[in-house]
Image: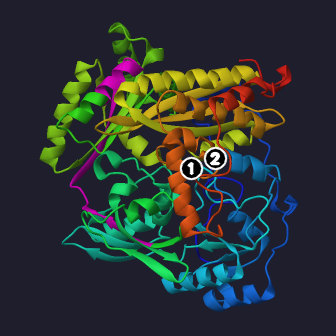
Amino acid sequence: MTDVKHMKWWGWGLEGIGFHFEDKPDFVPFVQKAVALDVRTPPVPPLSFDELTIAPPRLSPSFEASLVAIVGEENAFTTDEVRVIHTYGKSIRDLLRIRRNEIARVPDIVVYPGDEWDVQQIVDAAVAEGAVIIPFGGGSNIAGSLEPLPDEQRTIVSIDLGRLDRVLEIDEGSGLARIQAGAQGPDIEEQLNAKGWTMGHFPDSFTHSTVGGWVATRSSGMQSDKYGDIADIARGLRMVRPGTIVDLRPLPSTSTGPSVREMIIGSEGRLGVITEVTVQVHRTPEVREVQAYFFPNWKAGLAAMHEISESDASPSITRVSDARESGFSLATRKASKGVSGAAQSILMSVLKRRGWVLDDMCLSFIGYEGSASHVSYEKKLVGAIVKKHGGLGVGKGPGALYDQKKFDTPYLRDFLLDRGAAADVSETAAPWSKLQEVYDGTVAAAQAAYDALGVHGWIMCHLSHSYHSGACLYFTFAFVHGDDPIAQYEVVKSSIQQSFMDTGATLSHHHGVGTEHAPWMEQDISSGGVALMQGLFDSADPAQQFNPGKVLGTVSLTAADVAEVLANAPRATPTEVPAP
């Protein structure tokens, strides 16, 4: 294995790091209520790697030799573990399959280029060989953007960009930085911070994802309200294609026909291999803090976020959780003692006296950055809006804790999987006028799916990114699964995705399309839009050698299709779901 950092093959993050509930007294009863699961049940560990069934690599000795000649023996691998690590992303479907030894097709060889010229040689050699090319960043994708097609007969080459991990140049006069595509979030910020800069892009996957992956999947970060989505941040890029390089200079704006930059952003490796991105960067702020607020209910929280988006304030984070997710957040706190515990009890008593129903209470985090005077000004503006909508500020203590733990939540999925429960996410975006309808429709659709399955399920939500015209809603769902967890997951996931379409939202706000969301593309962008996109892919890659099957897939679902899935859902037996 090279020095490139990889997540563990069977779950999220690094070996030895996981979720623990022993110091969180409210967590056990919360999960029991939410999904009827006793988390004190001894976990069932994943299979050992030796138990996996992995087909041998399919590649000719001459092609293997040509790739080894390009990158060196120490950077080309046909070993089982390296190939498996590069097979799936980290969606719940990916984790369920790998834990159940369901691995239909793995890459035949994994290569680690050391520079762009290596990438060009690899691409040209693979195209000449008639092989399939799948670019690989950090492996954090949860939409099926990485896996090979199960019936692929051609040789599959996984190009891991992990050795391309440097900030190459900072144009301080323009606030632009050239960054190699394989650089992961922490490496980027460490290199930028050392010179007084920040990119300001912090997706949930920040610790294990790359700038090339962010561009390829059209990522958003927790501070996108201030810094923009990756489509706003990425101003220029370089992408290797057969025999050539697409070189887009980082110009502030152009009028040069349809945007090639926009064609590449979100293309998920279908058009080529991104090797370098030039991004907007900003001076590290003098002050950065995250304040916590409570709202009496979800409706009040949404209304406040909407008004903040229209105000003169420009926070870096505008996040509000519904009552269910707020309950989850409070349940994952460590036990409070002494002054802190007493203060919490007093606060809850005050809210009750104000007439709040605590089960309806919604937790919000709002971030501020800039000079001390600017942050003070914005906090006053936001504070007045929060108060107008019945909210209450509770200081920066909870916000600081959120800031420290914001990248740890994915470890909870592995914890639940070890105990027979599946948890995943679906996110969307819609105009402000439709958000409540989207929320209500999605919660109802998930509950209908749980009823069809005969399981005790849970769904919760937060608003995570605000725009002038609308916002992102991010849903998390979970249930205790039976003997066919993937079939049950399909029922819930399909119902949620279809609800997005039925209420005028989009299929994904920032996780991309991959294979997971491809069946809804026609409903989302119209048949004419699909035809236009298909024409682009067919023209750019007529032999379908670049990550085939992603974005458009091969199947389009209708609302009637999803209804049929619900009608034929595999129902759980009473023994599969513990009593609440």
Q: CA distance from mark 1 to mark 2?
A: 6 Å
Image coordinates of residue 171 in percent, x first then y, are 25, 74
> Could you tell me which secondary element the residue under label 1 belongs to?
loop
> Quadrant of the rendered structure where residue 231 is?
bottom left
Which residue is tagged 1? 513
Please indicate whether residue 162 sits to the left or right of residue 46 in the image.
left
- Extent of the magenta region: 276-305
> Quadrant of the rendered structure where residue 34 is?
top right
Name the residue rendered at 49%, 43% in the picture: 525
Which residue is tagged 2? 516
> In the rendered structure, are the residues bearing label 1 and label 2 in contact, judged by CB atoms less than 8 Å apart?
yes
Query: Which quadrant: the C terminus?
Result: top right
Image coordinates of residue 351 in percent, x first then y, are 35, 14
Image coordinates of residue 281 in percent, x first then y, are 29, 63
Query: Which quadrant: the N terminus?
Result: bottom right
Q: Is residue 556 magenta?
A: no
Count of marks, rendered view: 2
In terms of depth relative to the viewer, which is nearer, 53 or 393? Answer: 53
Please indicate whether residue 253 sits to the left or right of residue 493 in the image.
left
